[in-house]
Image (cartoon, rainbow, N blue to C red):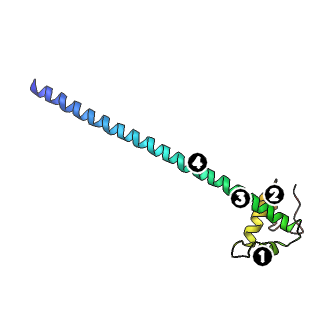
């Protein structure tokens, strides 16, 4: 009978230890889940801010090359030169800021004389 009691106590101790380990793992998973949400939320916020800033920059580049009559290269120079902004980046920003921009139009690059006006 003493052996049976000892086995029951050992079994209870093992089950209690396993329950504590499961509880720690669950708490760890909850913390990791919450931190994962923070990471993804922060990245989504960053992407939204970047998109808004790029849209503003693209719209201004569009005005420089449209209303102000500058070439894309001249607009890049007005923006501080290629140390700050490359012609390729300027073309991308300007194209991305246009409403209903499609991939077939973005292949035109800088939207020069052969590019179709959108909007």
Residue position for label 2: 98
Give the position of the C terminus as an image quadrant. bottom right
Tell me the tag on residue 53: 3
Under circle 4, the secondary element is: helix
Residue under the image location 72 percent in, 68 percent down:
89
Q: Mark 3 or 1 closer to N-term?
A: 3
Locate residue 73: give its quadrant.
Answer: bottom right
Residue 98 in the image: above or below residue 65? above
Q: CA distance from mark 2 to mark 1?
A: 21 Å
Q: Image check: 119 left or right of 40? A: right
Residue 25: x %, y % from top left? 37, 41
Q: CA distance from mark 3 to mark 1?
A: 20 Å
Q: Mark 4 or 1 closer to N-term?
A: 4
Residue 97: x %, y % from top left? 78, 58
Under circle 3, the secondary element is: helix
Residue position for label 1: 77
Residue 15: x %, y % from top left? 27, 33
Q: Mark 2 or 4 closer to N-term?
A: 4
Locate residue 91: give its quadrant.
Answer: bottom right
Tell me the tag on residue 41: 4
Mark 2 vs mark 1, foreground winner is 1
């Amino acid at each position: 009978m003493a052996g049976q009691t000892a086995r029951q106590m050992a079994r209870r101790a093992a089950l209690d230890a396993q329950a504590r380990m499961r509880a720690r793992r669950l708490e760890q998973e909850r913390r990791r889940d919450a931190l994962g949400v923070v990471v993804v939320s922060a990245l989504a916020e960053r992407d939204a801010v970047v998109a808004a800033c790029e849209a503003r920059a693209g719209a201004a580049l569009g005005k420089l090359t449209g209303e102000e009559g500058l070439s894309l290269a001249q607009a890049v120079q007005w923006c501080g030169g290629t140390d700050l902004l490359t012609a390729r980046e300027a073309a991308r920003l300007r194209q991305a800021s246009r409403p209903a921009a499609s991939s077939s139009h973005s292949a035109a690059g800088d939207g020069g004389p052969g590019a179709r006006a959108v909007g």
